[in-house]
Amino acid sequence: MTAPVLLITGASSGIGAATARLAAGKGWRLVLAARSRQALRDLATELGGPTRAVAAACDIQDWEQVAALPARAEDAFGRLDAVFANAGVFTPTSFLHGTGSPERWREMVLTNVYGTALVARATLPALVRSRGHLVLTGSVTGRITVPGQLYSATKWAVTAMAQSIRAEAAGTGVRVTLLQPGLVDAGDTTPDRAADPRLRPEDVARTVLFALDQPDTVDINEIIIRPTGQAAHR
Ligand SMILES: NC(=O)c1ccc[n+]([C@@H]2O[C@H](COP(=O)([O-])OP(=O)(O)OC[C@H]3O[C@@H](n4cnc5c(N)ncnc54)[C@H](OP(=O)(O)O)[C@@H]3O)[C@@H](O)[C@H]2O)c1
């Protein structure tokens, strides 16, 4: 069988880059999407160059750029089998105190909610054609209450989005997996969590590949992964 093709958003660092490396090692061909062109190009080269991995610079808040992603995959490799909608950002917030300009909140909501929705909308028609698989990165914070945290609210939105997409896609053959990591040694966090245990991005990547590696009759709906010892309320 021809090597399957996985599109990853947020592939320039952290969980996305670790997943790209692990998937490449298991024979997947990759389309690597994020805004940082050079990081994507370097990773594509590391993973074997244009026959194995291609860079697709893209801001997921921009519909035209997102809408071009499936064609990038199909032009490069002739198919699109799976999408890891993983790009996201974290900004500390409080609804009671001044912790920076709320103007930064817009960026987080537009990336984590609107951008993730655009990635789903743009890629699902191709995934229906391939009877493929959509994996979305939510967060443990998308299932618990975190005081004052708008980030958590954006991840509750991803939780609902994954369920909504799975409901709409029933009968198409498309599988939908919601990934909910706890604290990972990647991206931004708040100083009060400096001493908390963390997963490595590679730990999370293994769970993504676990879901992707299932037979097409098996849909892993949700994966919750915390570092050992992480408090249940975080
Ligand atoms: N780190 C944690 O503790 C943790 C826990 C649970 C869930 N998560 C989630 O895991 C996902 C990956 O984050 P990470 O922890 O691996 O942090 P990260 O290393 O900062 O990765 C975030 C990725 O998203 C990309 N990105 C951000 N805004 C984008 C945009 N507008 N368009 C396209 N790409 C964009 C970034 O690339 P560019 O800057 O190059 O665009 C980067 O590749 C996020 O959804 C995050 O919310 C993280």
Image (cartoon, grey):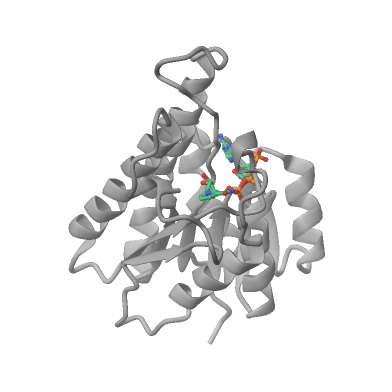
Please tell me which residue is depicted at 48% across the width and 34% down the height of the picture.
111
233 or 126, nearer to the observer: 233
Residue 138 shows up from this direction: no
Name above or below for residue 217 compared with residue 173. below
Q: Position of residue 94 (x, y in %)?
A: 45, 22
Q: Position of residue 71 (x, y in %)?
A: 51, 52
Ligand 1 lies in quarter: top right
Name above or below for residue 67 compared with residue 62. below
Quadrant of residue 173 within the rendered picture: bottom left
Name above or below for residue 226 compared with residue 183. below
Quadrant of residue 116 within the rendered picture: top left
Q: Is residue 207 left or right of residue 141?
A: right
Q: Is residue 63 left or right of residue 176?
A: right
Please tell me which residue is depicted at 50% across the width and 67% down the height of the picture.
79
Quadrant of residue 57 within the rendered picture: top right
204 or 62, nearer to the observer: 204
Q: Is residue 186 left or right of residue 216?
A: right
Residue 216 shows up from this direction: yes
Q: Position of residue 20 (x, y in %)?
A: 65, 64
Please tell me which residue is depicted at 69% across the width and 63% down the height of the picture.
53
Name above or below for residue 86 compared with residue 133. above
Please tell me which residue is depicted at 55% across the width and 29% down the height of the picture.
91
- Residue at the bottom extreme, as displayed: 1
Q: Count how many numbered circles sit on residues in the image.
A: 0
Q: Position of residue 69 (x, y in %)?
A: 52, 48
